Image (cartoon, rainbow, N blue to C red):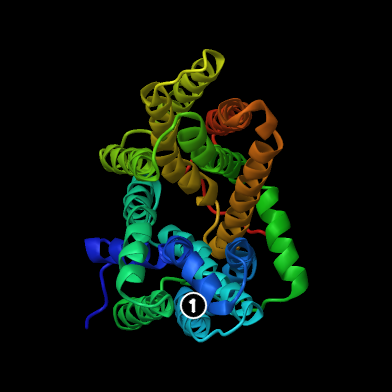
Amino acid sequence: MKAIDPHARAFIILLAAVSALGALGIDMALPANGSTAFALGIAPETMAWSLSVFLAGFATAPLLAGPLCDRYGRKPVLLVSLLLFSVASLGCAGSDSLGTLLAWRLLQGIGGGAGRPVILAIMRDCFEGSAARSKLSFMAALGMLAPLLAPSLGSLLIGVARWQMLYVLLAVYGVVVGLLLARGFTETLASPLPQLGVKRLLGGYAGALREPLFVAGTLVTSASFASIFAYVGAAPSLFIDELGLTPQQFGLAFGACSAGLIVGAVGNGKLSARHVDAHTLLLAGAGLAVTGCAGLALCALFAAESIWPWLASIIALTMSGGLVSGNATQLALQPFRQHAGTASALMSALQMAGASLAGALVAGFAALGSGPSMVIVCAACQAFMVGGIVWLRAQAAQGRTANAPAEPLH
């Protein structure tokens, strides 16, 4: 198998397959929670720990994987992460107690989360400007297919096989993607770091935080990501308990909202490929987000009983996320080349922190109702996102554009 040209469609598909590990690890396992709990002799609600430890590993892995890929290269770190994901998936399948399952799920989350900063670093290595924004958006759109399809695939598999087969399938997926990567991917890091120690690691993160473009772009992506997690946290209670949807109807509504992300990402990819300015697209995304948030506020204020105004407002919100993410990510990472993995790792960690905070705030305001709690958190997220976009435009006005030369972190 020849090396895949970074400009080929197969290259983006391969990176999207790696980025899908997190969604597959989360969403495919959910339908098997009940049968897994029964097999392990534990209460069904205890299975919530399985998701928690996976997310813990998924959130913390980038902080180490990013700097490692700056030191040893993108390909070795990706291969190790895929190997860890596959081995841990087999470990989950062979678990006979909750403790054993949680230990393997933690390692599975680490394997699944380690790839994200490396993928972003690869995109920074290979592309710049509008090309980078376009490729990032198309990759994100492909990656979003995983959370749409994984629950259905998991439900289908659990209907014909034991719960262990879900994890076996995840292990096979990791192995197949790893083999494709080993044979078709050529290292993209031109100048590895000469060494990696605690001082250099912390210095790299501190250097990224001193870069205004990085901070502003990360603020935009994190706020957008957090607003979507606010909706995800409130959606089951809002749609099922308050609006009276059946679980099947909820699945369709949730899928429609998720499709908004794909539409926004694909639209951004096409417009970026036509060299539409990143700041113009960011403003369009902000307009969609504010419109969606205003619609949600009106729904909550007038206690809308129909699903349609809620759905339209949420779709506007998710489309904004698809439109904003690729542009803000490219602007944030453009100042870095040799340290792209370190910067990507910090961005990923801050995004996860923002998403976790948004979910906690939605739960904290739950007494107000699902709709109002979602509106409050989303409005706060949009305020931060718009502030970040204004900051990015100010940097551009000062000559700090997306094509500014890379700066050393140390």
| Residue at (50, 38) in percent of width and height | 235
Identify the image quadrant of the C terminus: bottom right
User: Where residue 289 appears, x then y in whole percent?
Assistant: 47, 27
| Residue at (49, 47) in percent of width and height | 329
Identify the image quadrant of the N terminus: bottom left
| Figure check: 203 above or below 389 | below
Residue 70 seen: no
User: Where residue 258 appears, x then y in whole percent?
Assistant: 38, 43
Q: Could you tell whether 4 is left or right of 400 in the image?
A: left
Residue 298 seen: yes
The residue that label 1 is drawn on is 85
| Residue at (33, 47) in percent of width and height | 134
Q: In which quarter of the image is residue 215?
A: top right
| Figure check: 12 above or below 382 | below
Q: How crowded is mark 1: few (under 14 residues within 10 Å), some or many (20 or more)?
A: many
Q: Quadrant of residue 398?
A: top right
